[in-house]
Image (spheres, rainbow, N blue to C red):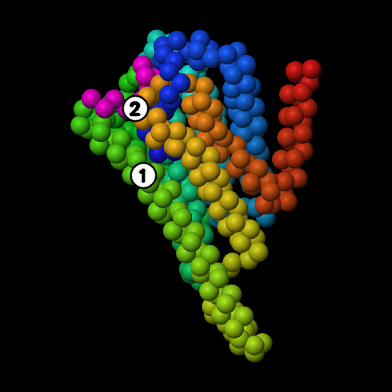
């Protein structure tokens, strides 16, 4: 994830960046990747939009945690609608990006914007989960009410805007890079190196430190409370301990949401790990190829899998998305038969 967050580049396949993926690989590989990208975009985008619609339309789902989930679903929908098609076009039609420099830069900024938003949402959600188990119900509602939640969500989106705005004020340069088949950070100047380092630190901080740390602390707190309650045999003491020591307001629903967000984060790591490993192995041969576009599409598919994780953790999500996906599947099958 970290290296793609900075520049999409890969592999040791050896095809030229200016010829396009189809010129160096068999038609079967090109067809497979094309179909995969189409399915991922259609299913993933509609699945995340359905999640947003459900949270907005079902009263019992309008909680603080689900508001954060809906905001992340918006970022995921943006990643699917923008990033995956752009990455595919880089490998399939690199000459398009070279001949349309403005669109090339715009597409890169949009990718960077949605990925930055998604990454920062992960640590915001993890912090929210820890806050609810470590503070009283009163304190939680004071800081994570409608106003507090709205401020946190807006801050995440504004921070993403700040990140992509730095090159406009001279902190880094974005331009077409032939080896990438598209736009990326030009490392010819020192400020661009610092910009790339800054982006890398954002990813490491969120995915490698803050998010896992808060999730670990959350479950450690839950485990300690349970052990404290189980250690007492007196029902009265258990009741008092439950009132004073249990995570305030941490209902079964909140526990389900916490598990869902942890599953989403783990899915993120699983999806991006293969591409990270590929990049580290082929660090000296940064050329486009079928392997790279496959792993990169799989990495971005994390945003697709999130919709199914949401559906698997909540009956309201599940009932609607199963019906919706069956309709989408029927339409796709009817088109190809």
Q: Nearer the viewer, residue 230 or 104?
A: 230
State the image quarter where residue 234 is shown.
Answer: bottom right
Q: Secondary structure at mark 2?
A: loop
Residue at image mark 2: 284
Q: Position of residue 305 (x, y in %)?
A: 61, 40
State the image quarter where residue 158 is shown.
Answer: top left
At horizontal 33% and vertical 44% (from top left) the residue drawn is 201
Q: Position of residue 95 (x, y in %)?
A: 43, 11
At horizontal 69% and vertical 48% (from top left) the residue drawn is 312
Residue at image mark 1: 202
At horizontal 47% and vertical 34% (from top left) the residue drawn is 275
The correct choice, above or below, for 60 with respect to 137 in the image is above
Query: Is 148 left or right of 327, judged from the image as shown?
Result: left
State the image quarter where residue 236 is shown.
Answer: bottom right
Residue 159 visible in this rendered orientation of the protein: yes
The correct choice, above or below, for 24 with respect to 54 in the image is above
Q: Nearer the viewer, residue 233 or 15?
A: 15
Q: How many marks?
A: 2
Q: Which residues are magenta?
A: 178-188
Q: Quadrant of the N terminus?
A: top left
Query: Is 312 left or right of 304, judged from the image as shown?
Result: right
Query: Is 246 left or right of 108, judged from the image as shown?
Result: right
Which label is found at residue 313?
Answer: none
Q: Main secondary structure of the magenta part?
A: loop
Which of the two discs, 1 and 2, sits closer to the camera?
2
Q: Nearer the viewer, residue 154 or 277?
A: 277
């Amino acid at each position: 994830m970290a290296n793609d967050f900075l520049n999409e580049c890969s592999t040791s396949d050896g095809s030229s960046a200016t010829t396009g993926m189809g010129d160096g690989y068999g038609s079967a590989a090109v067809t497979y990747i094309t179909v995969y990208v189409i399915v991922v975009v259609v299913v993933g985008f509609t699945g995340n939009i359905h999640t947003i619609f459900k949270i907005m339309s079902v009263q019992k789902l309008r909680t603080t945690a689900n508001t954060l989930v809906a905001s992340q679903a918006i970022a995921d929908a943006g990643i699917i609608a923008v990033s995956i098609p752009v990455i595919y076009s880089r490998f399939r039609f690199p000459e398009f990006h070279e001949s349309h420099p403005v669109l090339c830069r715009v597409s890169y900024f949009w990718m960077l914007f949605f990925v930055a938003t998604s990454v920062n949402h992960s640590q915001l959600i993890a912090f929210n989960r820890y806050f609810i188990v470590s503070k009283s119900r009163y304190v939680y509602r004071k800081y994570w009410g409608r106003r507090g939640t709205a401020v946190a969500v807006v801050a995440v989106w504004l921070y993403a805007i700040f990140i992509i705005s730095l090159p406009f004020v001279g902190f880094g340069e974005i331009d077409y890079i032939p080896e990438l088949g598209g736009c990326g950070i030009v490392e010819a100047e020192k400020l661009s190196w610092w910009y790339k380092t800054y982006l890398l630190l954002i990813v490491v901080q969120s995915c490698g430190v803050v998010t896992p740390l808060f999730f670990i602390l959350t479950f450690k707190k839950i485990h300690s409370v349970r052990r404290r309650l189980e250690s007492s045999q007196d029902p009265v003491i258990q009741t008092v301990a439950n009132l004073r020591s249990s995570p305030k307001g941490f209902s079964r629903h909140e526990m389900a949401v916490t598990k869902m967000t942890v599953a989403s984060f783990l899915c993120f790591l699983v999806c991006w790990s293969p591409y990270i490993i590929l990049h580290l192995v082929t660090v000296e041969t940064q050329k486009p190829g079928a392997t790279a576009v496959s792993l990169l599409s799989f990495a971005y598919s994390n945003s697709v899998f999130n919709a199914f994780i949401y559906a698997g953790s909540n009956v309201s999500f599940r009932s609607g998305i199963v019906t919706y996906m069956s309709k989408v599947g029927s339409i796709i099958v009817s088109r190809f038969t």
